[in-house]
Each structure stands twice: as C-alpha cells, then as structure tokens.
Amino acid sequence: MKTDRRGFLAGSLALALAPGYLRAESTARIVVVGGGYGGATAARWLGALGHDVVLVEANRSYTSCPFSNTVLGGFGTMEELSFGYGDPGPVRVALNRAETVDTTGREVVLADGTALPYDRLVLAPGVDLLFDALEGYDEAAAGIMPHAWKAGPQTELLRRQLEAMEDGGVVAIVAPANPYRCPPGPYERACLIAHYLKEEKPRSKILILDAKDQFSKRPLFEEAWAELYPGMIEWVPMSAGGNVIRVEPEAMTIETDFERHEVDVANVIPPQSAGAIARAAGVADPTGWCPVDPGTFESTLVPSVHVLGDACFAGAMPKSAFSANAQAKVAALAIDAMLRDEAPPVPKLINTCYSLAAPDYGFTVAGVYAPQDGLIAEVEGSGGISPVGAPREVRQLEAEYARNWFNTITGEAFG
C-alpha cells in the first residue's frame, strides 16, 4: 500500500509540474534547513525539478505534532507519529544542526563546521518556545509542567502524568495568545484528554486558561464538549480571568490576573517565535516571525532566502502542517522560475485543518488564500467550517477524512 501511495504522489507531482515546469537546464545549489512538513516537501519538489538539494535536519526522524494529541487520548502511539529520511529521492540529507547563515557569502555552517554553499536557501525551522515569556516557566519547569508543543518526549511525559493522576484530579491547559503553532491545538487536546479521562477517570476535570477571548472553531469545540464531555471541560477566556501571569511548578499552581489555581497536571503552552536559525539569518523581524513575499515566500528582509511554515508570517494563512506543505510547493515552483529568470506564477494556496474531538468525531476549517496588497489574504467567499449541529455520521466521516489526510501528507513529505 505504501508503494502505491508513493506512485500516486509521484504521478501527482509530475502532473503538477508538467505545464511549463520542466527539469532545470542547469542545477542550482539549494539548501533546505528543517525536515518537517514544509522543509521535507520543499526539498522533494526542488529535487524533482532537477536542482542540487541538501536537506539539513538535526534529527534522524521527524515526530509529527499533528495527531500527537491522539497519544494523550489513549488511542494513538508515538510510533505512528515518527517518520525517517531514509528514502528522500534525489535529495541529499545532512543529519546535522545548522548553526549560522552567512547571507552575504551564501553559505550555511553546520555544527560540525561544514559549510554548505547555496544559490537559494529555504528555511523551515518551525518554532522556538519562549521560555522567558511566562514567570516561573523555563526549560526545567517543562519537566514538571510539560508543554508537549514539540511532539516527542514531552508528549510521552504528559501522557504518563495523565496516567498517574488520581480520579477526580484537575488538568490545566494554558493556551497562549496569537500567533502560535496550530491555533485549534489546545482545544483538540482538551477534547482528547477528556476522552481518556471519561473512560478511565470520569470524576476528573479539565481547565483551559486562555490568553484569548476567541479561538479557532470555537462553536464546534463547544458543541463537542457539551455532547461528549458534559461538565468536564471549563474554558476561561482572558476577559474572565484566563490570562496566566505566573506558574509555580513545584507547588503545581497557576496564577492568573485574578485567581490562583492548584492543579494535578499542568500543560503549559508558552508563546512562540520563529526557530533560532531564522533569527540568526536575519529574516525575523521584531515580532519574532519572518515576513515574506506572498507569492514566492522569499524573505522581505534578506534576498535569496525563503521561509516556510510556522516560522513565517503568512498573513491570514494559519500556522499548520497543511499550510507548510502548500507553501513548500509554491516556494519550490517560484524558486525554480526565478532561477530560470522567469516570473513566478501567482499562487492560490489552500489550508484545511482537521480536529478530532474523539476517535470517531471530527470537524474542519478550510480556507483559500492568495497574494493581496503584499500579504496573503483569504479569498472572499472561500472556505468555511463544518456545520454546527451535524449528525454523528458526518462527524465520523470527518474523523476518517482526518486520518486519510494524515496518511497522504506524511507520505508526500517523508515518502
């Protein structure tokens, strides 16, 4: 089945490239830093276009944040989230950490001192967690109050804490202000933790302390909470005292503007910024994110550097795996056209974000985006969200769509 999927994806790539996108007559040296959904997809597409591509990634395998909440819900495994780089097609993989970027000399320097020259650089470093943004929360505190916002050991730690908690305990989720990776993620997490607790520890509660007054797909989440987990999940918005100002990990307390909460398990999701290599390359502005040209994803601060995925500021387009994958394809075609001294095509991008409220209960938000006035704007009248009040058969079908999407996008990015 995996071979068939590879064949389908290879055929799709060939069709997408057919009208005017022949293999490059002279290959360019392209370095891609970051092997997640954006970077891995960009590297494959650029390699298929005939360029000399090196993918730089510090880890031997990639652990997916999408679907990592299923592990917390007790029906997913870490193995299902792990993808290697063993068969990257025409792309060379450097398993190393990118330390610095010389944008004048156009080379990336790795941790072992190797210098990789480039004609074009693609940065897809994801996010860094700002551990100094919340009083009392640092990397050591994450060992007690895990963020689990980078899937892997933190996901496993949070899962163990949920398993060890007594029935009747309180789980707190601290949700940050916008922008951050995966806007609906904290609320899906609340659902899937509630799914586990309902089965195993039904007297327990979940408290969402939020630095916002609104969140993505709110009507659908609130409908799911009422239908599936009545009385189990409490959302406290910023205006009602949900903004967290301080945590005390040893005491397991969380302090908001108006109240102090003692909890049994705390999932603290701190504010975020573009990954460190983006800042080192000078492509991040004072907001911590990377402004880009909406048609090519080339940095507006540093020429010949393109930024994809969670690290870039993409206007109305949210920070999601689907967005990163779509941006990677647009950037690859734009880079190829620019290297051939041709005008890049004007793109239209799509994003569909699936959320699970239970193993058999899903819903979506979708959008179509295009360049407008120097930013990426949502195309008027496009997209939308799943209907509120839909029958369970529809929710079951959307949960199946979510799994099919996951299998397809991971196959496309990682083979």
Image (tube, helix red, strand yellow):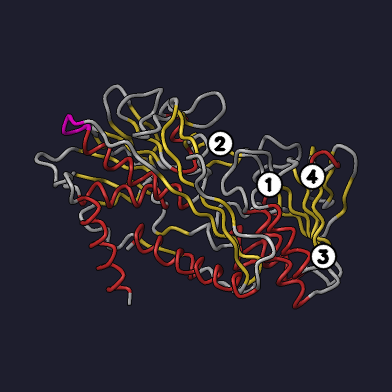
CB-based contact (under 8 Å), mark 3 and mark 1: no
Q: Nearer the viewer, mark 2 or mark 3?
A: 3
Q: Which residue is mark 1?
A: 215
Q: Which residue is mark 3?
A: 232
Element type at marker 3? loop
Q: CA distance from mark 3 to mark 4?
A: 16 Å
Q: Earlier in the sequence, mark 2 or mark 3?
A: 3
- Numbered disc in front, either 4 or 2: 4
The residue to which callout 2 is attached is 273
Q: Are marks 4 and 1 in contact (CB under 8 Å)?
A: no
Q: Give the mark, 4 or 1, whose residue is nearer the N terminus.
A: 1
**Extent of the magenta region:** 338-342
Q: Quadrant of residue 1?
A: bottom left
Pointers 4 and 2 in contact (C-beta within 8 Å): no
Q: Which residue is mark 4?
A: 237
- Magenta part, dominant SS: loop
Q: Is residue 377 left or right of residue 263?
A: left
Element on which disc 1 rests: loop
Mark 2 and mark 3: span between their CA atoms?
Answer: 32 Å
How far separated are the C-alphas under marks 1 and 2? 19 Å
